């Protein structure tokens, strides 16, 4: 007999399926969050205009390809990313990977609440000349995000569908106000020095956003259309994300501001900025908490969903409230590097090695552990975590992409030519 948690993680009823544009709206909402605007601004600061534009396009293409592959696996299998990890790594083996996912996502949940409360207090001060402490905002924001997550994907989907048009208008306003001060041709002719290369810019863009593309199956599994994964990735990363990154960099050129809130205020977007800060952070963090909850459910399927969400949300709020996140961000960045290569194993396994086992009955006779997956993941994680620190190697010029490719190649070789290592279910 399946628990409610197992039902949501493993089986999706026809009534739960939605058209892909509604799923794309959820993914697009993440693009309208503060981290995306900040990334566009930082890439502008570090690169020449021409190099920055190339970095935006190349980064968006890479994210679209990875997100499209992972999203398509989610549509086809109807499994969350964390159940996909169980299929690829085995029941026991996946526990380690999924706990790493959960810690990282909850950590970023706390980081984003901290960023959110700081932005809200600054906007209140600028618009109303009031000084408000951050801690009540941390608690209230966390509570709203936890409540949204308790209602699952449907609540997040409704919220995103309502907010996307508003945030698109606000971003268009930012572009319009910027064009009023500088034309596109003038922008393209701006000369500035660069402290980073195009490859560095692409790495920055991909590194910040790639986790979202890897866990895309968490939402694309609800798509009615088989092409929903590809459509979601294209609109989220090749259209909306690219647009947001460009607008942010263009506005920074016009205003010569190096901080996103100051930029918005200088463009007379005081009240409109509240929508980006509040709506974008709300959906982004609800999605972070939703995915973290799924990772725990996949590892401990008998645990109650509401208890999991409440505990995880409280942990994220506590981290923000205790203001320990400045030192925690370095750890989270390292942890992100560690589990990004997981995508290399899942994509190769689902498309090339064992496509037949990815479905609703995937865990029926699942292996306890897959040594090829773990060996490949370990190699990719070491490469991603220490490349540029202990050694410097690159094929694509983008560390996380090199790690995914390396992981996929090693996994393929082991599965094809080391039969003694293969999991029993193959």
Image (cartoon, rainbow, N blue to C red):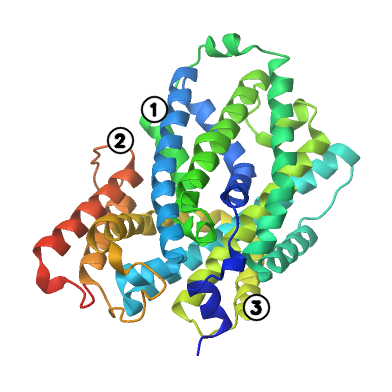
Q: For residue 25, say whether it is visible.
A: yes
Q: Position of residue 306 (x, y in %)?
A: 65, 78
- Residue mark closest to the camera, 1 vs 3: 3
Residue placed under numbered mark 1 in the picture: 198
Q: Give how far apart the Cα atoms at labels 1 and 3 are.
A: 44 Å
**SS assignment at label 2:** loop
Q: Position of residue 422 (x, y in %)?
A: 17, 71
Q: Give how far apart the Cα atoms at labels 2 and 1 are.
A: 9 Å
Sort mark 2 into few (<14), some (14-19) or many (20+) by Cα contacts within 10 Å: some
Residue placed under numbered mark 3 in the picture: 306
Q: Position of residue 347 (x, y in %)?
A: 32, 55
Residue found 34% across the figure and 59% down from its top: 342
- Tag 3 near tag 2, CB within 8 Å: no
- Tag 2 near tag 1, CB within 8 Å: yes
Mark 2 or mark 1: which comes first in sequence?
Answer: 1
Residue found 44% across the figure and 63% down from its top: 81
Residue found 73% across the figure and 47% down from its top: 163
Residue placed under numbered mark 2 in the picture: 397
Sort mark 1 into few (<14), some (14-19) or many (20+) by Cα contacts within 10 Å: many
Image quadrant holding the C terminus, namely: bottom left
- Please state if 330 lies on the left or on the right of 36 as rendered: left
Sort mark 3 into few (<14), some (14-19) or many (20+) by Cα contacts within 10 Å: some
Q: Nearer the viewer, residue 128 or 269?
A: 269
Mark 1 or mark 3: which comes first in sequence?
Answer: 1
**SS assignment at label 3:** helix
Residue found 35% across the figure and 81% down from its top: 364
- Tag 1 near tag 3, CB within 8 Å: no
Q: Give how far apart the Cα atoms at labels 3 and 2 are.
A: 43 Å
């Amino acid at each position: 007999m399946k628990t409610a948690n197992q039902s949501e993680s493993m089986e999706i009823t026809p009534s739960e399926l939605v058209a892909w544009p509604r799923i794309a709206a959820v993914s697009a909402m993440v693009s309208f969050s503060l981290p995306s605007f900040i990334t566009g601004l930082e890439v502008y600061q570090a690169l020449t205009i021409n190099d920055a534009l190339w970095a935006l396009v190349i980064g968006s293409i890479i994210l679209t390809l990875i997100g499209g592959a992972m999203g398509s696996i989610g549509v086809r299998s109807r499994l969350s990313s964390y159940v996909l990890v169980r299929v690829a790594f085995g029941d026991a083996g996946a526990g380690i990977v999924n706990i790493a996912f959960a810690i990282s996502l909850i950590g970023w949940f706390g980081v984003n609440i901290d960023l959110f409360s700081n932005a809200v207090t600054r906007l209140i001060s600028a618009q109303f000349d009031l000084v408000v402490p951050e801690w009540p905002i941390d608690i209230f924001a966390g509570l709203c995000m936890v409540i949204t997550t308790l209602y699952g994907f449907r609540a997040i989907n409704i919220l995103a569908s309502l907010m996307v048009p508003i945030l698109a208008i606000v971003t268009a306003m930012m572009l319009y106000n910027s064009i009023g001060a500088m034309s596109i041709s003038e922008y393209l002719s701006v000369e500035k020095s660069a402290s980073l290369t195009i490859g560095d810019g692409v790495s920055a863009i991909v590194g910040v956003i790639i986790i979202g593309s890897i866990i895309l199956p968490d939402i694309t599994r609800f798509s009615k259309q088989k092409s929903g994964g590809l459509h979601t990735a294209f609109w989220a990363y090749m259209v909306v994300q690219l647009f947001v990154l460009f607008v942010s960099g263009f506005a920074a050129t016009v205003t010569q501001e190096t901080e996103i809130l100051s930029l918005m205020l200088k463009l007379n977007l005081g009240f409109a900025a509240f929508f980006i800060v509040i709506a974008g952070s709300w959906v982004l963090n609800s999605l972070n908490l939703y995915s973290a909850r799924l990772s725990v459910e996949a590892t401990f399927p008998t645990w109650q969903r509401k208890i999991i969400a409440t505990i995880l949300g409280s942990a994220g709020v506590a981290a923000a409230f205790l203001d320990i996140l400045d030192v925690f961000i370095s750890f989270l960045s390292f942890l992100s590097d560690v589990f990004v290569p997981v995508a290399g194993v899942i994509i190769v396994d689902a498309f090339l090695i064992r496509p037949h086992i990815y479905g609703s009955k995937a865990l029926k006779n699942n292996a306890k552990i897959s040594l090829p997956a773990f060996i490949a993941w370990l190699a990719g994680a070491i490469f991603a975590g220490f490349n540029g620190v202990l050694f410097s190697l690159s094929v694509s010029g983008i560390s996380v992409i090199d790690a995914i490719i390396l992981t996929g190649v090693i996994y393929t070789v082991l599965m094809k030519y080391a039969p003694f290592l293969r999991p029993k279910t193959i």
